[in-house]
Image (cartoon, rainbow, N blue to C red):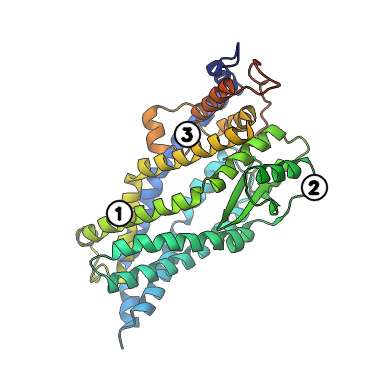
Amino acid sequence: MAQGFDPTAATNAYLAVLPPEVHAKATAYTQGGHWVLLWTTLVSILVSWLVLKSGVLVRLRGGIEAERPRPWLAVLVVVAVDTVLEGLLGVPWDAYARWWREKQYGFTNRAFGGWLGEHLLQLTIAAVGAVIVFSLLYWLIRRFPKTFWLWAGVGMTVVGIVFFILELFLIEPLFNTYKPAPPGPVRDEVVAMAKQVGMPSDKILIYDGSKQSNRYTANAGGIFGFGRVAMSDVMFKKDADQAEVKGVVGHEMGHYVRKHFMIGDLFQGLTVMIGLFLIARLFPWACRVLGAEGVTGIADPAGVPVIAILAAALGLLATPITNTFSRWVEADADHFSVVHFNEPDGLAKALVKTLEYRADSPSKLEEFIFYDHPSVRARVQAMMDWKAAHPKADAAGEGPAPAPTIAPNEAPR
């Protein structure tokens, strides 16, 4: 340990950068978000139930199959209509949870029209994805009625890869403009970092992330040898802190090099497998409880709202498990960044900026249930512990870095 350096004191110094009223606001926002999670699930269940009780899906399926059975067409039409109806019915709640609440806390300056346009585009993309996924799912249900959940879990890993590639090349450019990062110290540093860890360095991109947020954001994505680093234009401001850029981008590179996407894809396939296994067994009971008149069984696409309701409830119950996996992934990316680029203070300064919208010191139970990232305190403490154990040659024995100046809304999510 560096002589005279106390990692816990350094962590406390970082967390004390923002005044108590900012911490109080962050706590209110974070804990309010826990209720938003619950209410989002309840609204989702209500919306699905309303569509189910309307009987429109049963009538659609019946009309399509009146002359002759065409299960593929029935699935396509019914799922498309269901997704659009549920999406539109959910817009008022989404507007509150994703726009109005963010605006009230000062985390977005977007006009409602801009938010709504992007949200409707997202709903359109989701509808197309739902039609593809449910068409495959209902084919598996018809083909393997006893074991469809097993094959669906396997298939979801393949679909996940396809959707990931489509997101990189087709979907993300619909929301932001990507172009090669301009020459300069930031780009040069990122290129050198990519080469250092064996990541492709020919695609260093910048995108207009400032139109959505003024926070430091970056991502490193890719698969099968293709890799790219995409950084928000916020990171190219004249006063950008090189150490912060290095710490944040190093974290994102950790996701790519450590193959977190592939691990996450396998985890998703497993959760889908378990979820569908439970849904298959709960479906008849749910139909009785929900009053799903006209739904003939799990192979009937008119029962897709029942599947959605069960998936929403099971997803809420599984939140601690999925969040635990996510925290492990994020902690591993932090570790990768500090091991390979040794910028503990840079990453710590970036993390401190998230204190405005993420309570830094939750209870163990709260973190276990609700946090998809380790708490800021835990992450900064890990950085300071690393700094104590691995002092830089030119900074051995030095204390914590000077307290950073925190500008509003400049932080990585």
Give the amino acid at mark 1: Ile
Q: Amino acid at mark 3?
A: Pro
**Which secondary structure, mark 3?**
loop
Going by the numbered disc 2, the residue's amino acid type is Pro
Residue 243 falls left or right of residue 363? right
Q: Secondary structure at mark 2?
A: loop
Q: Residue at x 44, y 54 (%)?
A: 265
Percent position of residue 309, x then y:
32, 56
Residue 137 visible? The answer is: yes
Q: Tell me which numbered mark, 3 or 1, is placed earlier along the sequence.
A: 1
Which residue does the numbered mark 3 point to in the structure image? 374
Q: Nearer the viewer, mark 3 or mark 2?
A: 2
The residue where tag 2 is placed is 183
Disc 3 versus disc 2: distance between alpha carbons?
34 Å
Residue 84: x percent and y percent? 45, 66
Residue 218, by quadrant, is top right
- Which of the 4 image quadrants contains residue 139? bottom left
Q: Determine if residue 45 is in view.
A: no
Q: Vertically, is 128 above or below 36?
A: below
Residue occupied by mark 1: 274
Q: Residues within 10 Å of mark 1 (few under 14, many from 20)?
A: some
- The label number, if any, that marks residue 349 in the structure image: none
* Residue appearing at x 60%, y 49% in the figure: 220
Q: Could you tell which of marks 1 and 2 lies nearer the N-terminus?
A: 2
Task: Depth check: give the residue in front, 108 or 154.
Answer: 154
Quarter that holds the N terminus: top right
Instruction: Mark 3: give few (<14), some (14-19) or many (20+) Cα within 10 Å.
Output: many
Compared across the picture, whether 317 is left or right of 232 comes to left
